[in-house]
Amino acid sequence: MRRTLLPYLWPVLIGVLGAIVLLNAFPQLIGRQAPSTPAPYELAPSAPEEPAESRDAPEVRQAEPLTRQQGPVSYAQAVARAAPAVVNIYSSRVVEREEHPLMSDPFFRQFFGDETPRRQRMLSSLGSGVIVSEDGYVLTNHHVIRGADQIQVALRDGRETLAEVIGTDPESDLAVLRIELASLPVIELTDTTQIAIGDVSLAIGNPFGVGQTVTMGIISATGRSHLGLNAYEDFIQTDAAINPGNSGGALVNAEGALIGINTAIFSRSGGSQGIGFAIPANLARSILEELVVKGRVIRGWMGVEAQELNQELAASFGLQNPIGVVIAGVVPGGPGDRAGLQPGDVLLEVDGEPVLDPRQTMSDIAAVEPGTRLPLTLVRGGERREVTIELGERPTPRLPRPEQR
């Protein structure tokens, strides 16, 4: 008798286990709220902030469209136009360390009380930047100057000066500095909607601190995203050699105009392997203007966390095709919460446009002015619903403090 029951018990056990896993993953199916997780962002304070210093938008030079004819034998003219505007950036910060590792032991610390002997140590980092305005504005990467107490800029002509940080945008990894020098060389910016895969590209920077260097390659791809480098990604990919110290430097075309700001590489060894990424000049220009004029980058925000909808998830929500994104979390008190959005909702359309990719949707929402009301189409419990959301301003993310070591 025991043997005859075994074939029937296994399907029942498997079915029960599957139901438990499904309910744990999607507690909203039985009306239970998913456990809330700490929001990775801080809501903007209600108290008015002190107005930033008023500045006019910087005047940048627009380059002429690239002439795609017979390639030149030499790119010396392009380098001569662009290289003087590429600077070396030396950032430093002072950290304190205990005089001896034993001081971390409470037994030894009790003999010194609060007057534990400490010492200061200077940490320095190296990067590059690009002068984009005669007013002295310099574009570089946020990670090049992050946490710096002092930033020194060295020009190709030998001049050196300290730089003022105008503003930074960690989510695009861009920063704007300003230097006070006369007769500054300025680079021209291209319209990056006109670049093409296969165009020649030159990377100019200060790799490994050896001095200004130029490497050549081509534009390998455009619109690269889903790399996990920044919150907002729309990278230009190039095979021009980019190495540590090139960050914040210029990626220019065959005529010496700025295509993008060199930012990152894909490498298994730490050196260049022919896969480098640059922030497009169009995006860099918009960030530059917002940081200079407003002191910060203002982005639209829905206050939700979304994940991609695959075939299995679509079937569990009663959808035939994996179209849309699943709302995995809602920030308490955020725009999505006020609009009534819930975890488990499937977002199909935003302002009449179909939603296919969470990152692309986030980028599109960021480009909309806070306070704008947008219609949303979603599916909840198998029913199609129409909701209107009023976008808020995306708060500044809480970033970890630079490690002191």
Image: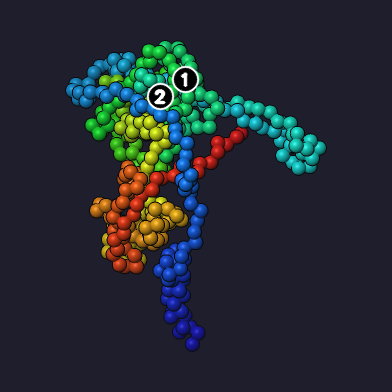
Secondary structure found at label 2:
strand
Q: Badge 2, how many Cα within 10 Å: few under 14, some, many 20+?
A: many
The image quarter in which residue 85 lies: top left
The image quarter in which residue 280 lies: top left
Amino acid at dot 2? Val
Give the vertical position of 349 relative to 189 (above or below). Answer: below
Residue 141 visible in rendering: no
Q: Return the x and y of residue 288 as percentages of the image width and height.
A: 37, 30
Q: Is residue 352 left or right of residue 298?
A: left
At 44% from the left and 44% from the top, the residue drawn is 395
Label count reads 2
The image quarter in which residue 216 lies: top left
Give the vertical position of 355 relative to 298 (above or below). Answer: below
Q: In this view, does 246 lie to the left or right of 114?
A: left
Residue 42 visible in rendering: yes
Q: Return the x and y of residue 183 as percentages of the image width and height.
A: 38, 13
Q: Which label is found at residue 153?
A: 1
Q: Which label is found at residue 223?
A: none
Q: Return the x and y of residue 312 as percentages of the image width and height.
A: 35, 62
Q: Return the x and y of residue 228 as percentages of the image width and height.
A: 41, 43
At 44% from the left and 29% from the top, the residue drawn is 53
Q: In this view, does 364 lie to the left or right of 396?
A: left
Secondary structure found at label 1:
strand
**Mark 1 and mark 2 residues within 8 Å of each other at the beta carbon:** yes
Of residues 11 and 38, the one drawn nearer to the viewer in this rendering: 38
Amino acid at dot 1? Val
- Mark sitting earlier along the chain (1/2): 2
Q: In this view, does 143 lie to the left or right of 375?
A: right
Q: Which label is found at residue 138?
A: 2
At 72% from the left and 39% from the top, the residue drawn is 104
Give the vertical position of 192 relative to 5 (above or below). Answer: above
